[in-house]
Image: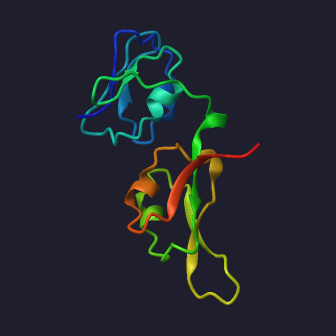
Amino acid sequence: MSFFITTDCTGCTACRVICPTHAIVGKKKHRHRIIDSACINCGTCGRVCPAKAVANPFGRIVAKIPRKEWVRPLFDLELCMACHICIDACPVNALDAVLQKIQDLHPYPVLAREKDCMACGFCAAECPVDAVTLEKRQG
């Protein structure tokens, strides 16, 4: 079961433009719809919908959140084991692995492309050691 678009949709296309899997279809000024088989349940469509016309799989309307208030992943390098599962889980390739500790042989994850991050939380959900937390960015 995926997110879905309610009858409150105005057809503004904000959701369609931002969807990382192109799961949203529809014409401008007409109600859009989400293709179940393509939806990855990231919720980004709801966070950008000015009409508050996107509901989660449980039927709850997703709140519109200004992009500057979206959460971003923070990595605890003391817990991280550099497995890169979080990087693989990111549907928009916003994460990279880089050497971060002096004399360390293992690259650790970083948010390399902040503008691409959709605040989906997949990186945190998939981390086997809970080294990824989601927090609002500072400033």
In percent of the image, x 59 and y 48: which residue is there?
135
- Picture coordinates of residue 67 (x, y %)? 62, 34
Q: Quadrant of residue 2?
A: top left
At horizontal 62% and vertical 29% (from top left) the residue drawn is 66
Left or right of 133: which side holds 136?
A: right
Asked if residue 132 is positioned above or below residue 59 in the image, the reply reads below
Determine whether 11 is above or below 72 in the image. above
Give the quarter of the image for residue 88. bottom left
Work out which residue is located at the far right of the displayed protein and give it.
139
Left or right of 115 on screen, residue 126: left
Which quadrant of the figure contains the C terminus?
A: top right
Q: Nearer the viewer, residue 135 or 8?
A: 135
Frontmost residue, 98 versus 26: 98
Which quarter of the rendered picture does the N terminus lie within? top left
x then y, percent, for residue 75 = 57, 63
**Image coordinates for residue 91, horizontal then vertical, percent:** 44, 51
9 w.r.t. 99: above or below: above
Q: Position of residue 22 (x, y in %)?
A: 40, 36
